[in-house]
Amino acid sequence: MPSSASYSILTFTLQFSPSLRFLLKTHIKYRPRSLNSLIMSSASRSSPRQAESNGTRCGGAITLEEWQGWGCVSPVPVMVNSVIKDLKLLENNIDAQMVFGGNGGKLQGDFKVQEDKKHRAKYETLGDSDKKFQFFSARQIACRLLGSRGYLCQKCWLPMEDCMCSKVKPCSLWHGIRFWLYMHPKDFLRQNNTGKLLWQVFGVQSATLCLYGISEDEELMWNAFKDAGKDKVWCLYPNQNTIPKTVQDAFNHQSSADMKCAYSSTNRDRPLNFVLIDGTWSNSAAMFRRLKEQAKLVLGEEDLPCISLATGASAMHKLRPQPSWDRTCTAAAAIGVLSELQLLPECSIHGLDKQADAVEDALVVLLEALTTRRLRMGRSITRKVRHSRDIC
């Protein structure tokens, strides 16, 4: 950057597939800073932090208000609070305070060493594989919750100083659709997660978070699917074992009368349920496998119906590249299905294109917030290799 410039503008444009018919343009302004300030901020970005001790103590149980403040709608998971109780007991026994650092509420220091030993020992005592899996998920989420108290904004999951909530504009989602964000615990409270944008824009009843391995969340989701009926549950996932279906393939076989009946005001409680797998591509296979197992138990389906989208790259490719250009982030997948449904004559009157635009706008806000933060901290904004397998 020339030293004589008072500011500079970084502009990049991504063109998506013609079926989506949208173009993202992001303009990011920043002022150059001295080398000294860059070094100071870069050093501070990974400094450890102690868990919040004011109000809700670091080892205190998660209340329903706090749990739902992070975007959840289920009751507080029993196993998460059990893990937190164990962490607090260990903290008292070894006289060492929990310390977290980096992204995702990772334990650090001597406490981490002792906690690793304890949780591994408990893990071995759990004979049932499903209990082991639930314990793994609960521990991940408990640590992220404790490490994020007083540090991240509950709504946008960004550090308080970078909160973007005031820039995100809410929008009502058509009642004929409900999104389910089936999220891996390692992506819960992740700052560059894009799935969170859906309930920020549409609300938690229209875009509902379901945490992978949390029984309270999964039970709530599958009860909703059972009530809706198996013909109203679709997973937005490129299932390699079956011939991929597009939105046109999935819904064009229904007659116009059937479609209008399905989306009428009398069917508000039975919307089309779209599941978005929100995790890394390496984790998505196991997540999809669990969805198929549950679909067989709850819906009697041997396979979970899937829809593939021709979305192309999202704006988040700039900061969080995908393994290939045909894979995209969670928010862009939602934009894709809304845009493709809008092309169906029976759905064209519901303003789905405007709802897709609202998510697109929120995605741009997130990209600007993340880019501004990285520039301020002296970090690269062109990550070409790191996290190249992420999808959220």
Image (cartoon, grey):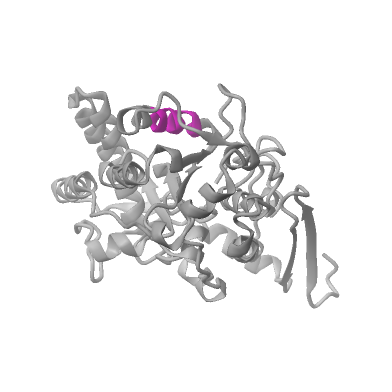
Q: List the single residue furthest toward the front.
A: 257
Is residue 102 positioned above or below 69 on the image?
above
- Is residue 7 shown to the viewer in this render? yes
Question: Which residue lies at the image location 70% right of the left edge and 70% below the top edge?
Answer: 34
Residue 16 location in percent, x, y? 75, 50
In the displayed structure, 288 sits above or below 103; it is above
Q: Which residues are magenta?
A: 283-292
Q: Position of residue 350 (x, y in %)?
A: 58, 63
Rendered image quadrant of residue 226: top left
Q: Main secondary structure of the magenta part?
A: helix
Q: Quadrant of residue 138?
A: top left
Residue 294 falls within the magenta-colored stretch: no
Question: Can you say whether 167 is above or below 207 in the image?
Answer: below
Q: Quadrant of the N terminus?
A: bottom right
Judged left or right of residue 320, residue 21 is right
Q: In screen coordinates, is 279 left or right of 389?
A: left
For residue 107, say whether it is visible.
no
Instruction: Give me the residue at 29% from left, 49% from top.
Output: 142
Instruction: Please state which of residues 233 and 199 is positioned toward the viewer in this rendering.
Output: 233
Q: How many marks?
A: 0
The residue closer to the viewer here, 342 or 169, is: 342
Residue 38: name its quadrant.
bottom right
Q: Viewed as shown, does residue 360 lie left or right of 258? A: right
- Residue 67 at x, y percent in the picture: 29, 59
Q: Nearer the viewer, residue 71 or 42?
A: 71
Q: In the depicted view, which residue is nearer to us: 208 or 346?
A: 346
Tell me what residue is drawn at x 39 percent, y 28 percent.
Answer: 301
Task: Name the residue located 15 percent from the left edge and 51 percent from the top edge.
Answer: 92
